[in-house]
């Protein structure tokens, strides 16, 4: 029996069953024992009735049947065009299979409950979950009837052309009807959802998520097995000792996977729906893969809806617990964008503000990683050049100081050379630390300037001392700056 909190308990319905037209989609979820059992009747959209015809027209344009419809086409060209048209219908069926696979993958959600994520176990469980969903999709197509045979081929070309024309029109019509019938079956199997359009740009839709929750208990037991050799002359290449046996360690890593089925229902206002090419909503990677899997003949019928969500209802139940079942209902007001991908009244997938925020953060991290990598690559070739320039300018500055001692230079050239040297010291040090991918490259560069700049000024003070005696406090201050810079740099490297 479902369990809900008092504030989430619905007052009007006890189940999540919905009905569209004459078709009922049972959810088999009972969320209340007190409310009377009723079915939510969704408002029908009159334009949805034309979807099979529009799909049939889009497929018909792809068929290479124009050859046998053209006047003067010979018997071989007519039969070849008919066979190619049947092959094109088979390719359309295969493209629908790829679309359904991408839609199922977009409706899988992974959560980590306890411990760190074990990647191998997670990937295996997700692949198994996807295989289970695809098994529910199955192959719902009826075989395409091939009317071409020797008796028909012996008829006049006009009779042959009309027969193939009629057969292809029937096959295309059956394809469109089976496609939308398949979507309805997948709604019944709780893989896809439905959308209801309401007045004043409002809508309500639901979709399903297969949730996989991992618990990683870590290593629960460790054992090892020792095997000793009777006679062995093999020596270990690293330590040079003789190998007398082998020890095999075995660590047992245990965890659990909990499988849940989540039903998301969104109430949205200020709703807009646009073609896929005109949509500007933020899409998670799984939805991007879904959009790429849409075949071009189906693309005009696929739309993206967006708006402002003011109510979200999530109902979850465990599907892999044998002795008990729990349904959790959460009903909370939130504000944000709430996109979804639809074909007529059918919702292939949806996502919300949490997914949009996660995708924006993922893109920001990826952009930062790309920028950081480009900066490191640039610093790797800039660092040696800047270091060489720093050494050269330092030597020139010391030479100018020596010339000033001999009476052939002024203090202005020494000051200019010193400032240039300090600037190059900072640039070369910063590039060197960035190339090493040091987190504190900026602060280490300043410490580098303090250390080597202090030594440079100390050398200049010694030279200038012969021309004009300076205060003896200056070298002690410079030595203090050098020592302090070295100590601070050591702390940054340690962290």
Image (cartoon, helix red, strand yellow):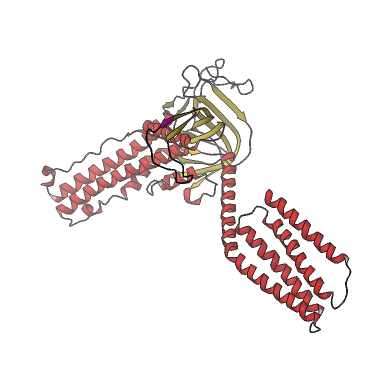
Q: At x 56% / y 55%, what residue is drawn?
A: 370
Q: Does the magenta stretch include residue 230?
A: yes
Q: Taking the image as drawn, is residue 50 in sight?
A: no
Which residue is farthest top? 34
Tell me if residue 108 comes above or below residue 86 in the rendering: above
Q: Taking the image as drawn, is residue 398 in sight?
A: yes
Q: Is the magenta stretch mostly helix, strand or loop?
A: loop
Residue 258 location, x and y as percent? 50, 27
Q: At x 15% / y 52%, what residue is drawn?
A: 75
Count the labels in the image: 0
- 365 to the left or right of 97: right
Residue 338 location, x and y as percent? 56, 40
Pick whichever, 329 or 27, lies toward us. 329
- 79 to the left or right of 366: left
Q: At x 81% / y 78%, what residue is drawn?
A: 411
Tell me if residue 487 comes above or below residue 318 in the rendering: below
- Quadrant location of residue 22? top left
Residue 154 location, x and y as percent? 10, 47
Residue 447 location, x and y as percent? 73, 59
Q: Does the magenta stretch include residue 242?
A: no
> Residues in magenta?
226-236
- Quadrant location of residue 453? bottom right
- 121 to the left or right of 134: right
- 332 to the left or right of 98: right
């Amino acid at each position: 029996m479902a369990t809900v909190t008092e504030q989430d308990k619905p007052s009007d319905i006890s189940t999540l069953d919905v009905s569209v037209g004459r078709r009922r989609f049972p959810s088999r979820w009972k969320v209340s024992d007190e409310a009377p059992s009723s079915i939510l009747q969704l408002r029908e959209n009159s334009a949805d009735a034309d979807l099979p015809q529009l799909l049939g027209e889009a497929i018909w344009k792809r068929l290479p049947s124009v050859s046998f419809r053209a006047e003067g086409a010979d018997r071989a060209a007519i039969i070849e065009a008919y066979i190619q048209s049947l092959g094109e219908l088979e390719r359309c069926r295969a493209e629908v299979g790829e679309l359904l696979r991408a839609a199922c993958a977009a409706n899988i959600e992974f959560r980590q409950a306890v411990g760190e994520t074990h990647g191998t176990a997670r990937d295996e469980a997700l692949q198994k979950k996807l295989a289970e969903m695809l098994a529910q999709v199955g192959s719902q197509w009826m075989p395409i009837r091939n009317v071409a045979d020797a008796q028909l081929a012996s008829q006049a070309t006009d009779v042959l052309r009309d027969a193939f024309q009629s057969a292809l029109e029937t096959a295309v019509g059956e394809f469109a009807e089976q496609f939308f019938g398949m979507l309805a079956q997948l709604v019944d199997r709780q893989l896809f959802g439905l959308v209801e359009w309401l007045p004043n740009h409002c809508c309500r839709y639901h979709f399903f998520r297969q949730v996989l929750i991992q618990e990683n208990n870590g290593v629960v037991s460790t054992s090892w097995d020792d095997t000793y050799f009777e006679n062995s002359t093999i020596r270990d290449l690293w330590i040079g000792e003789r190998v007398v046996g082998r020890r095999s360690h075995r660590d047992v890593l245990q965890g659990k996977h909990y499988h849940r089925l989540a039903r998301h229902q969104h109430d949205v206002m200020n709703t807009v729906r646009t073609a896929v090419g005109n949509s500007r909503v933020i899409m998670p990677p799984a939805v991007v893969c879904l959009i790429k899997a849409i075949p071009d003949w189906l693309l005009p019928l696929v739309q993206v809806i967006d708006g402002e969500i003011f109510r979200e209802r999530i109902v979850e139940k465990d599907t892999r617990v044998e002795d008990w079942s729990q349904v959790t209902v959460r009903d909370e007001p939130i504000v944000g964008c709430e996109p979804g991908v639809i074909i007529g009244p059918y919702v292939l997938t949806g996502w919300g503000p949490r997914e949009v925020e996660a995708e924006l953060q993922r893109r920001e991290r990826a952009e930062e990683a790309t920028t950081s990598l480009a900066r490191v690559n640039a610093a790797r070739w800039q660092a040696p050049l800047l270091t060489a320039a720093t050494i050269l300018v330092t030597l020139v500055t010391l030479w100018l100081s020596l010339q000033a001692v001999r009476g052939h230079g002024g203090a202005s050239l020494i000051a200019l050379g010193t400032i240039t040297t300090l600037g190059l010291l900072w640039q070369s040090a910063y590039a060197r630390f960035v190339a090493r991918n040091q987190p504190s490259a900026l602060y280490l560069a300043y410490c580098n300037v303090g250390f080597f700049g202090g030594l440079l000024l100390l050398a200049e003070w010694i030279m200038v001392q012969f021309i004009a005696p300076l205060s003896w406090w200056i070298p002690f201050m410079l030595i203090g700056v050098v020592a302090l810079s070295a100590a601070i740099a050591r702390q940054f490297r340690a962290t």
